[in-house]
Amino acid sequence: MSATVFLFALLCLNLTPCVSGGKILVWPSEFSHWLNVKVILDKLIERGNDVTVVTHSATPSVNISPASGYNVEVLQVPHTKQDIKDNLEAMLKYWTHEMTTDTILQASQKLKELSDTATNHNLATCRELFSRVDLLEKWKKEKFDAVLADPGFMCGELLAQKLGLPLILSLRYSFGHTLERLCGQIPAPPSYVPAIGSEKTDKMDFMQRLRNIIFYGAQDILFYLGPTFYWDPFYSKVMELVPRVSSMRCLVEPRALLLLFISVNVRFSRGGNVLVLPGEYSHWHNMRNILDELLNRNHTVTVLLSSSSPSINITQHERYEFLVFETPLKPNEMHSLSEQLINIWMQHPKPSRIRVALQILDLMGKLRDMHSTLCDAMLRNEELISRLSARKFHLLFYDPMFICSDLLAEMLGLPLVLSLRFSLGFSMERMCGQMPSPVSYVPVPPTVLTDHMSFPERVQNMISYLLYTSMFRLAAMSLDNYYTDPHFSTMISTTLFVFGLLFGVDVVNAGNILVMPGEYSHWHNMRTIVDELVNRNHSVTVLVSSSSPTVQHMRKEKFIFNVYRVNTAKEEADAVWKDFINLWMNDTATKFETVFNIWQVMSKFMIMTEDTCKGMFREDPWLSLRDSKFEVLLSDPMIPCADVMAHKLKIPHVLSIRATIAYTFERFCGQMPAPPSYVPAASLQDYMTDHMSFLERVENVRLYIVHSAFFKLSMRFTFDRIYSELWVSHSGKVLVLPGEYSHWHNMRTIVDALVKHNHSVTVLVSSSSPTVQHSRKERFDYNVFKVKMVKEEAAGIWSDFTNLWMDNKVSKFERFFLFRNVLSNFKRLSEDICRGMLQNKDLLHSLRESQYDVVFSDPMMPCNDLMAKTLDIPHVISLRLSFAYTMERFCGQMPAPPSYVPAVAIHDHLTDRMSFSERIENMLLYIIHSAIFQMNQWLLLQDLYTELNGKPTTMCETMGKADIWLIRTYWDFEYPRPFLPNFKFVGGLHCKPAKPLPKELEAFVQSSGDHGIIVFSLGSMINNLTMERANTIASALGQIPQKVVWRYSGKTPETLAANTKLQDWMPQNDLLGHPKTKAFITHGGTNGLYEAIYHGVPMVGLPLFADQPDNLMHMKTKGAAVSLDINTMESKDLPMKPLDQAVYWIEFVMRNKGAKHLRVQAHELSWYQYHCLDVLAFLLSITALITYLCVKTSAFLFRKCFRKTRPDAKGQKNKEE
């Protein structure tokens, strides 16, 4: 499909600056398809785009008001709106009711007839569209930027072709994913992807997979055959082509079974007819939100309401249709009963339970009479029942607050949907809804119990269940006579919501409150609040330390004590508080002695504070608090770390406070203003009022300054450290297994971000790591395990690897044997790390005890996947790529069709647009690298993995269990290709704005004048070059007018010019972000490429090894780089400037509108090219020819060498004689 982009949302998000004020032509479908597209159009109009909608005179759903902001073009068609509705209703009726009784042939015939009618309507609209030559010419002159179409209505893609515009499709799905697979090239393996319409999941047994494949095949056949008789001739005529099915399908890819696709989406989008019987007060307000959403989804809502409703005002809700039936009751009478109920419940002080029970029994009779009256007025009103029956409602939506709603549903034959919070003891849910509710661990509402109950609490819970069950049955008996009236015979269990209303009020208002009290008078004051909360039926838990000198947590109270253990003894804490009080009251000490004594007491308080904070956040008390689901925290600032507790529990925080000295806490933490000109500082000896003389104001300001400084210092040196430790210790715990060199530098960025987000990060690294400097002090922790190999030996192995890769003087034969030695060394290194990590029992025990939440690793770290499996925790992999995507394909199951996805190789020159010979090369690369990868697994790793795992396994089996693969590129970097949901792009995550350069380097950059500078770096693994190459590069750099900053640590080149500055290390990101930087000469590492992309710097590439040739090929294809061969380049090689190259490609894109670079090249391939059948046929032919020649040659030689010769007759005769 030419210029087609399936992700319209991506266009809206990423191209907003470019399409501001753009013009979009819309070819919509009907019903829910239109409603979905309309949301997008409204957003486009909001962003200043011009939207033109093309519709027809018979549209049943695309109704656009003049005030909507759309431009509308209406096509006149011969059929009517009623014709479309009748055909759709016939389709739905047959699909939902009649089709099950017909045979397959009858159903197919009937569906074909209905589909033909819809197709004729669609075809008539298309004919009218393309007969309007004037309209098409007008649209061409208006220069639209894109066509937005729905595949549910044909000809949208044809309209885009005629106007030469990019096409954007809005699609939910197609049966068997035919449209997505055959037109969009989205992979859908039938082995685990259930076909839409097959009613299967991704977990299928053999027979289900077989049916799934058959369903896919049937839908594909229908997809290809459907357009042949209707659309191919029409499309050929419009495009002025010879009417051939193949050419038309390649042009626009028509789809079949259009009406089936529409009917599935429209069946529930036509809008149902809902009858509503609401409750009153908050029940109605809750239900109204649901009704508003039903209206937004095009459902019809009718609210059946009594004339005595005390809370529903029909004049305020014009969107609903109200149907009012008359009752002899008055609204004030019903309101009076509700008030009596609330007064009984809220009376204070609480009377005895017997008195409350008598009051409720007295009110029950009135409530029963009220409901009986309402039921009679509704159910015995024959005119009302007749009107309701005639309206043909689809269901009854009601609140159990209205008794007899279930009887009305039974009389009208409607399904019931019930809106309920809960009933006392879950009685209605258990006895009417058959909901299980085991009393052993399900606390009865309303209650203060949890699902962790002691034996006495379970006894209490059982008694509550029995009590509420008996009360419910007694209440139901009062209406049984009414329900068993022959006129209202029903099979529905009777319920009475009045008890839910009576006892539910308390539950709605009750809360679960956590209290962290202060000591002495602070606790006595807070105790009054706690008692009142308990009296109001709130559940209160007081969190207190074992060292509290005041809170007597051993006493039995109406609230709950949660005591956490601390190292400080109760007597020791009491002594510290007494020292503090004595210090305050001692007026004989000198100022020096007072300051010294304050310092001593404060030191003790700091120790107690740290002990208290760590005690409450230990694992056992913390988990208990987290699982209790508190709704609010009430605390005294006297108790430390309460704010951290509120933050961790994610609940609101209420402080109870008198005052702090100089209002420091209130001012710095609560932002409370306290002007010292008239607000006296509360101090040790407070004698000032708000009427202060000049000298008193001076003294007041001094007190504010002194106490503010003391408060800031105590926060800075004590509480900040404690809070930081607590913040980290209760966020996630991440175990990192890093790679080396640039892999670690990239991963380090993520580690720093995790630490910044208050996660606890531990980097597990071997003692032989040449890159990870584990001896340095960091914000995260290093866990170093010992291995046999030393750091220098490991660094030598990596150095041998890079030197071999870059040495172009070695013959292929020598390179093969040298590479074998390098691989052998890598095997030793890998085994050393794996055994040092996974056979270290102390290390594994320590890691298990740490209870990490996730393993974050680079596949460069051996056995990282086996460590995640051993610890049995989730695994996240950070990866750039592997050769020919072997690791991603075999371990991650990521699809990579070789017909248009080029294999990453040593010398990469392939793109997604390949000729026949290039596809042959690509297929061979896939085969070779796949074989190498599998052999490497089998020969080098399988035995090791099996030994360390304790049972047979492979690297791909363990790595395949990774939850997320973080790919260190972004979609704009890759060629368009399919990816799996757990493959996430994170390219450029290390990019950040440039910082100022060091003074010496800034002076060198500024000296470049208008010519600017060039940044040159070959990465962290290449420390130096051969002198020949270094001289070649230095000579070339000396011939350009720009100045060059070159990261180079080898011997100074003989041809080094004055414009070039050598640096052992340089701030690469800051240099690339400098306004004078004109270009970046790079080896093609991912980190450097993304920094250049981030700062908009064009690149010259010198790829060395690994993924670097592939990276630079991507940049070259995108027009952002040129690539040179470091082995063949000379100093006179001066290709087009990177900046000119970038400008050229930008102008090229502007000249050629559209988003074709987002389309996979599979659209340009024929079916046999896409499946590489031509390549396979060629390879098989060559293989067959070679096999044939070998067999024939072997047979010929065999006959020549081993042919038997008969002796002549004469010789035989002489022998006999």
Image (cartoon, grey):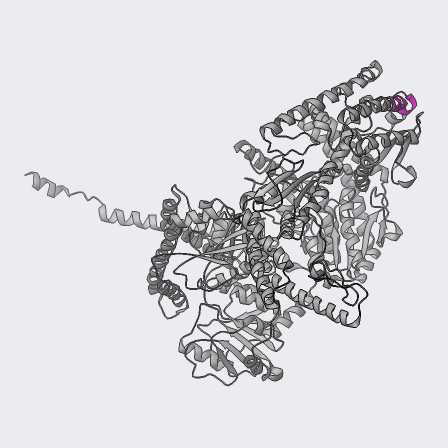
Does residue 275 appear in this view? no
Say which of 725 and 384 sits in front. Answer: 725
Q: Residue furthest front?
A: 588
Does residue 529 appear in this view? yes
Q: Residue furthest top?
A: 486
- Residue 797 placement: quadrant: bottom left
Q: Is residue 285 left or right of residue 986?
A: right
Q: Is residue 1101 left or right of residue 667?
A: left
Is residue 660 one of those drawn in magenta? no
Q: Residue at x 84, y 57 (%)?
A: 134
User: How many numbered marks, from 0 up?
Assistant: 0
Q: Magenta stretch?
A: 372-386
Assign the C terminus to one quadrant of the image. top left
What percent of the width, then of the height, locates residue 653? 69, 49
Q: Relative to 10, does residue 547 appear above or below in the rendering?
A: above
Say which of 685 and 856 sits in front. Answer: 685
What percent of the width, then of the height, locates residue 1196? 29, 49
- Residue 321 placement: quadrant: top right
What percent of the width, then of the height, locates residue 17? 73, 63
- Residue 952 placement: quadrant: top left
Q: Residue furthest bottom?
A: 1058
What percent of the width, then of the height, locates residue 789? 34, 59
